Image (cartoon, coloured by chain):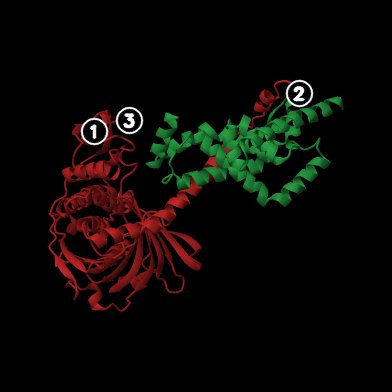
Chain colours: A green, B red
């Protein structure tokens, strides 16, 4: 936390090395978050890149209130949702194609994990409604509190908890169904 | 997998680790966006800052600092013959008046000056100092600084080093043409700014020049000049245009109030340079030496210096002295920069006061021992074999 504040302080004074350290520290985590939210490697990279660009452009005015990690994760979540909204048609086509050839299409996460079981799990998560998937991903990969997730989704904390719980239940069901196959 | 158990822990294992190529691309794109943003910001913000400074009229000599610095940009010591270029740009040999633009540094980020030359008189405006005009009398070694924002005017003497090292661009170009005769290299035809041009290049020991000339009229379209470690671009030339005498008059225009502005410019010393390093580190950079020095960087920093002086609320006289000292000291470096002297800057991110780190060293003319300036601004004579690595 203190290290992040020092890095931010240096970056605000023009040190690009400080930004490089911030990038190195958080880029993989943010890419994981975006990849699990968007289910597309290229889109995830675009979102993370856009978040960092927006960050470097606004850093002079930036005041860190909580953690830098939380701030960047929130930006990725917001931008991912915008991305999906703007590209809904494209996403729908992508989902349809994915459903048609589910066994052939691998998400970015699936591409880098070798375990067949984890690949099944990843595929199961992609089948969740976006709100449930988002609640799960933000909670488990973004390490966000339900209060924060609720704020992001503009819902009550209880609803956020429900989305998370129902999402996990659905993943279990999907996996059980696939196991039965 | 046992789906009912620890599914949250399993989900946490779904991590995406990008390869080095992906990171290089994303990080590179972010840095590129930052560069573009900073260029836009610099272009948009600098004149505004300058206008504020000029309006409250406190830092006339921050202005004068700029005058001092840019005054030496006409420096030329071409000593190496090079391109047979005279035939192509012969018209320039006879030009009595000339208008053109000079960019110090990179075309996208450098500071631009508009020059109107009539004989020994130059009218100059600078892109990041809106509202300010300089009239320079090379023969009389004087400058008239006009502040259009509050209609004030001031004279600056440029005797001594500045006068010795300053000359008009017309004279300078004539030297290029006549002295670089034998080592020219024609690079053929290229398109520049949508026009066809014949390109010539010549490299001297410490100078380089690249010239794009109109194949029909033989007039230069663009000249890129490297003097030591300083790079500049000249373009948008007009040769022998009619120039109203009032534009280059050394008289204070009607309606302007004359301020008394005095600077000792007769000699520029190492001590002046050290003082300018101190100002740069302490005032502009809050205690840290800059990443780089040099004319291009100095010109970019002038509005920042003015802004800092404003925020420090310094008395006008003190602010003026500081601006003048900054410019004068950097002139010492500019002489090294544009000449063939050996120098090295190593002060990036060094803290002011750090006696353990060398920030700058140079080899004075006619000596074998380097002068090394440290972070605490102390100076030592150091043999070449003992220079910092």
Q: Secondary structure at mark 3?
A: loop
Which chain does tag 2 point to? B
Query: Measuring 40% from the left and 33% from the top, which residue is drawn there?
Result: A6
Query: From the viewer's perspective, is the residue at label 3 or at label 1 nearer?
Result: 1
Give the residue pinned by disc 1.
Answer: B353
Up the image or down, B279 lies above or below B88; here it is above
In this view of the protein, which residue sits in the foreground, A151 or A119?
A151
Can you give x and y, in whole percent of width and height, for residue B234 in the image?
37, 62
In which quarter of the view is residue B286 placed? top left
Badge 1 or badge 2: first in the primary sequence = 2
Q: Are marks 3 and 1 on the same chain?
A: yes
Rendered-image quadrant of the C terminus of chain B: top left
Badge 3 or badge 1: first in the primary sequence = 1
In this view of the protein, which residue sits in the foreground, A62 or A113?
A62
**Total numbered labels:** 3
Q: CA distance from mark 3 to mark 1?
A: 20 Å
> Can residue B18 be seen here?
no
Give the residue pinned by disc 3.
Answer: B389
> In the figure, is residue A144 to the left or right of B284?
right
Give the residue pinned by disc 2.
Answer: B3
Q: CA distance from mark 1 to mark 2?
A: 62 Å
> Can residue A175 be seen here?
yes
Which chain does tag 1 point to? B
Can you give x and y, in whole percent of width and height, for residue A62 in the image?
44, 43
Q: Residues within 10 Å of mark 2 (few under 14, many from 20)?
A: some
Q: CA distance from mark 3 to mark 2?
A: 61 Å
Query: Measuring 25% from the left and 52% from the top, which residue is drawn there?
Result: B310
């Amino acid at each position: 936390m203190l290290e992040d504040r020092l890095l931010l302080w240096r970056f605000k004074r023009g040190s690009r090395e400080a930004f490089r350290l911030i990038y190195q520290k958080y880029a993989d985590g943010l890419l994981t978050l975006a990849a699990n939210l968007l289910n597309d490697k290229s889109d995830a990279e675009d979102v993370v890149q856009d978040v960092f660009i927006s960050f470097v452009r606004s850093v002079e005015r930036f005041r860190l209130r909580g953690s830098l990690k939380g701030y960047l994760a929130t930006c990725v979540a917001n931008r991912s949702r915008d991305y999906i909204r703007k590209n809904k048609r494209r996403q729908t086509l992508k989902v349809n194609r994915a459903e048609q050839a589910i066994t052939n299409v691998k998400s970015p996460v699936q591409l880098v994990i070798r375990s067949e079981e984890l690949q099944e799990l990843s595929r199961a998560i992609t089948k969740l409604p976006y709100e449930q998937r988002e609640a799960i991903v933000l909670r488990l990969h973004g390490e966000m509190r339900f209060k924060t997730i609720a704020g992001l989704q503009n819902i009550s904390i209880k609803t956020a908890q429900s989305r998370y719980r129902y999402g996990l239940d659905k993943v279990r069901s999907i996996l059980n169904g696939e196991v039965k196959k | 997998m046992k789906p009912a158990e620890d599914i949250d822990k399993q989900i946490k294992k779904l991590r995406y680790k990008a390869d080095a190529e992906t990171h290089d691309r994303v990080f590179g794109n972010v840095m590129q966006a930052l560069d573009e943003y900073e260029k836009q910001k610099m272009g948009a913000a600098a004149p505004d800052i300058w206008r504020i400074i000029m309006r409250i009229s406190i830092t006339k000599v921050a202005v004068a600092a700029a005058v001092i610095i840019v005054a030496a940009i006409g420096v030329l010591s071409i000593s190496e013959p090079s391109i047979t270029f005279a035939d192509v740009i012969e018209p320039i040999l006879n030009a009595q008046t000339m208008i053109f633009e000079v960019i110090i540094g990179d075309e996208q980020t450098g500071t631009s000056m508009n020059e109107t030359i009539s004989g020994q008189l130059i009218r100059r405006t600078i892109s990041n100092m809106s509202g300010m005009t300089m009239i320079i009398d090379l023969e009389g070694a004087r400058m008239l600084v006009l502040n259009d924002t509050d209609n004030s005017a001031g004279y600056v003497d440029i005797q001594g080093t500045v006068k010795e090292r300053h000359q008009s661009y017309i004279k300078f170009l004539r030297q290029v043409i006549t002295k670089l005769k034998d080592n020219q290299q024609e690079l053929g035809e290229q398109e520049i700014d949508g026009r066809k041009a014949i390109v010539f290049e010549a490299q001297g020991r410490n100078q380089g020049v690249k010239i794009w000339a109109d194949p029909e009229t033989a007039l230069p379209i663009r000249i890129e000049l490297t003097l030591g470690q300083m790079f500049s671009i000249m373009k948008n030339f007009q040769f022998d245009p009619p120039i109203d005498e009032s534009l280059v008059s050394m008289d204070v225009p009607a309606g302007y109030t004359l301020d008394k502005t005095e600077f000792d410019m007769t000699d520029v010393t190492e001590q002046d340079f050290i003082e300018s390093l101190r100002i740069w580190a302490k005032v502009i950079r809050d205690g840290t030496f800059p990443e780089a020095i040099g004319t291009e960087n100095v010109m970019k920093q002038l509005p920042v210096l003015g802004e800092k002086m404003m925020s420090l609320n310094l008395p006008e006289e003190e602010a003026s002295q500081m601006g003048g000292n900054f410019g004068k000291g950097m002139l010492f470096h500019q002489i090294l920069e544009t000449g063939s002297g050996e120098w090295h800057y190593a002060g990036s991110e060094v803290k002011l006061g750090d006696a353990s780190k060398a920030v700058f060293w140079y080899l004075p003319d006619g000596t074998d021992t380097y002068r090394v300036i440290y972070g605490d601004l102390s100076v030592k004579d150091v043999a070449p074999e003992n220079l910092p690595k």
